[in-house]
Amino acid sequence: MRGWAVALTVVGASSADLLFLLVGRQLPWAPIVQYVVVPLAGIIYSLALWWLLSCQTTVSRKERRENAELTFKFAECTVLIVGVVFAVHAARTGLASLQLSAESNRNAAVSMRLTANSNQTAAAALMHSAASNRTAARAQLYEGDNAITQAEAIGSDTKLQAIYAMPNPHCATDEEARAYISRMLGMVTDDPMICGVHDAAELYERTFGHSSYTGPTQPERSDIAQLRRMLLHCTLILNLLHSAHDDVPEGIIEYSEYETWAGYFNDIGPHPVLLETLWLWDKRKYMSKEFAHEVHDRLYVRGTDAEKRIIRLFLPELAIDTFGQELPGAYAKRLSTISATTP
């Protein structure tokens, strides 16, 4: 009977440990009970039972053997219970890990979708910004063209329209080319010193050099003032063409659209004031080398024999393939103000 009492004590203690393991597993120190207390309790109780039962001297050898077998059976039951508890705990832990992994995967998928939506939004914003930039660039081109038209339409004595007087001259000799230059300048001035200039540099000296300015008490010569205004007007036209030319590689306008703006080259041709303006832009680095190459191609390479003859006489630099190669690339400062001194 004493052996059965001890056995019941062992079973009770093991059951209490198992109950505590199942009920109190949420406590902070529950892992200690699960992995230390329960296994040690089962082993200690089983050994204690075997020791108490085997120490009974009043029982026979048969009873001691039966008690020992009973003790080992209880020990096996304790180990089995502990193994089941560990298996259940491992299964629950694995299930929780799988749930956490699935939740992490769902969160990652949501994050990826949010990132994709953000990228799509950013791409749409960039496309909208690019479209707005193209619209603004085109608006600037049309505003520049309107400014040129308005300047030519103000007053009948401005004579700015004279730059369109003879876009396709017929010059078979150098004398005829000189006569064309003199005739174009003669539409603005009757000064033989200006009409008889030899090249663009001399024309700039006659119109913007120190000798071209009068004293404070003398009236300004209207013909020289008109020639200066014509140079500024050609500057507006070249600014417009330069901007349109820059917009092509940036994807703002198509090359076919640029061709409509480049028609100014055909409208003006090798006018001496336009060549004077190009001489100034080349010396002052007011244009990029890409645009200088474009000017060389439009005015000289594609020009007629008469136009090439005029350019070789009045601005020989433009007739060379390397025209503007020393100019800055990609971006160039355009003419905004003109100094009174010759560069």
Image (spheres, rainbow, N blue to C red):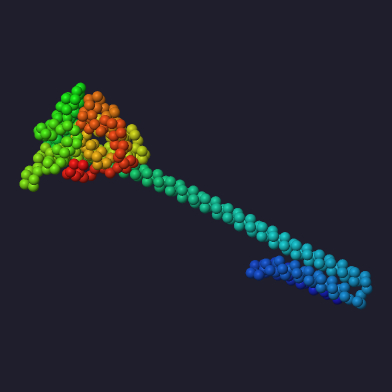
User: Residue 287 location, x and y as percent?
Assistant: 28, 40
Q: Residue at x 81, y 65 (%)?
A: 76
- Asked if residue 209 shows in the view, the reply is yes
Residue 250, placed above or below residue 117:
above
**Quadrant of the drawing holding the N terminus:** bottom right
Residue 207 at what x, y percent from top left? 15, 39
Say if residue 23 shows up in the picture: no
Seen at 52% across and 53% down, the residue is 111
Give left or right: position of 331 versus 219.
Answer: right
Q: Toward which corner of the image does residue 130 lie, by quadrant?
A: top left
Q: Give the residue at x 75% y 62%.
A: 83
Give residue 30's quadrant in the image: bottom right
- Judge whether 153 appears above or below 65 on screen: above
**In front here: 331 or 121?**
331
Residue 212 in which image quadrant: top left
The foreground one among 20 and 339 is: 339
